[in-house]
Image (cartoon, helix red, strand yellow):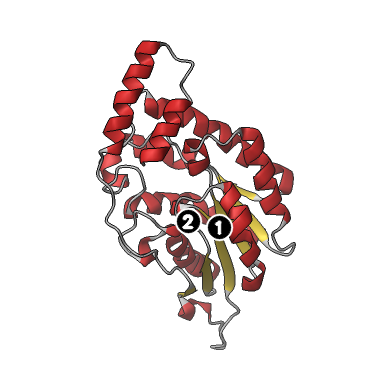
C-alpha cells in the first residue's frame, strides 16, 4: 500500500496547495494501516466439484477448463481459504449451474499490472488448453498511474495472445473509491482513475465480443455501504463475503459465454 498511495498523490499535483497537504497526510495514514498477515499464495489449481459432472448413465462429463489471469483479486488475497477465493467460488457455482466439473488454473499474481499479465502470465495460458480465460487486472495500474492509452495497448496485446478457441471474460476495474484504507479526497482520486481504466476494459470487451463483468457497478455500492462486512483486515482487498459478491456478478457472465 505504501507505493500505491504515494503514486495516487502524484495524480493530484494540479490541486491547490491546501488539498495537497491534506493528501500527504492521508498517504501517511494509509501507509500505517493494518496489513494482511504474510502467507504463501493460494494454490488455486485443480478440479472443483468433480462429482457434479456425471451424466444420467454415470459417465464423467468433460470438465470446463478455466484459466485466471490478473492481480491480487484473481489470486485470492483477502480470502480466508482457497475455497473462498474468487476463482474457486466461481468454479463451485459454475459446476452446479452447468452440471459439469470445473478445472481451475490460476496464473494471477498479487501486485500485477496489465504489463505483468502480458510479460509473465499470458504466455502460460495455451498449455492449460482453456475453454474460458478470465482476466481481472487494473487496480494496480490505477495506483501506478498507467495511462489509459498504455493500459489499452497492453490489454489489447494480452487479448491478441490468448488461444483463439477460448472464450474470454473481462472483469472491470473495481470501485477504488470504496476502500476505507484510503481517506477522502485520496479515495476520490483513486475512484476517478479507476473509472477511466474500467471504461477501457468495457470498450475492449465490446470490441472483442468478450464477456464483461461490471464489478464496480454491481458490487461497489454494497462495499461502500458495508465496508466492515466486505473488506478484509487491510480495509483494501475483499474478504470472503466481498468475493462472494464478486462471484454473484461474475458467474452469470461466465455461464453466458459458455452456453450462449
Question: Which structural element holds mark 1?
Answer: strand
* Residue 202 visible in image: no
Q: Can you give x and y, in whole percent of width and height, for residue 25 in the image?
A: 29, 25
Q: Which numbered marker is on residue 104?
A: none
Q: Observer-nearest residue: 93 or 18?
A: 18
> At x 61% / y 41%, what residue is drawn?
201
Circles 1, 2 touching at the beta carbon (< 8 Å): yes
* Mark toward the start of the polypeptide (1 vs 2): 1
> At x 54% / y 88%, what residue is drawn?
58
Location of the C terminus by quadrant is bottom right
Q: Is residue 86 above or below residue 101?
A: above
Q: Which residue is mark 2?
A: 74
Neighbour tally class for label 2: few under 14, some 14-19, many 20 plus, Cα within 10 Å: many
Location of the N terminus by quadrant is top left
Q: Observer-nearest residue: 159 or 205?
A: 159
Query: Real-space Cα distance between discs 1 and 2?
Result: 7 Å
Q: Quadrant of residue 62?
A: bottom right
Q: Which numbered marker is on residue 69?
A: 1
Amino acid at each position: 500500500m505504501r507505493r500505491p498511495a504515494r503514486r495516487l498523490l502524484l495524480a493530484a499535483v494540479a490541486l491547490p496547495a491546501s488539498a495537497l497537504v491534506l493528501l500527504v497526510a492521508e498517504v501517511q495514514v494509509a501507509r500505517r494501516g493494518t496489513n494482511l498477515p504474510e502467507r504463501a499464495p493460494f494454490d488455486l489449481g485443480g478440479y472443483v466439484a468433480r462429482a457434479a459432472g456425471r451424466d444420467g448413465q454415470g459417465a464423467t462429463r468433460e470438465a470446463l477448463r478455466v484459466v485466471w489471469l490478473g492481480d491480487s483479486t484473481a489470486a485470492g488475497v483477502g480470502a480466508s481459504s482457497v475455497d473462498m477465493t474468487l476463482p474457486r467460488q466461481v468454479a463451485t457455482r459454475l459446476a452446479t449451474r452447468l452440471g459439469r466439473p470445473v478445472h481451475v488454473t490460476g496464473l494471477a499474481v498479487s501486485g500485477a499490472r496489465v504489463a505483468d499479465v502480458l510479460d509473465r502470465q499470458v504466455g502460460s495460458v495455451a498449455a492449460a488448453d482453456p475453454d474460458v480465460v478470465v482476466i481481472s487486472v487494473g487496480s494496480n495500474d490505477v495506483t501506478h498511474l498507467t495511462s489509459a492509452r498504455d493500459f489499452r495497448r497492453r490489454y489489447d496485446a494480452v487479448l491478441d495472445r490468448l488461444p483463439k478457441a477460448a472464450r474470454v471474460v473481462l472483469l472491470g476495474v473495481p470501485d477504488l473509491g470504496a476502500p476505507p484504507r484510503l481517506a477522502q479526497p485520496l479515495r476520490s482520486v483513486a475512484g476517478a482513475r479507476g473509472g477511466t481504466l474500467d471504461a477501457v476494459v468495457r470498450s475492449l470487451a465490446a470490441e472483442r465480443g468478450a464477456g464483461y463483468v461490471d464489478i464496480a457497478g454491481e458490487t461497489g455500492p454494497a462495499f461502500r455501504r458495508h465496508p466492515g462486512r466486505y473488506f478484509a483486515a487491510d480495509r483494501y482487498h475483499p474478504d470472503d463475503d466481498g468475493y462472494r459478491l464478486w462471484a454473484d456478478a461474475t458467474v452469470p457472465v461466465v455461464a453466458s459465454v459458455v452456453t450462449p
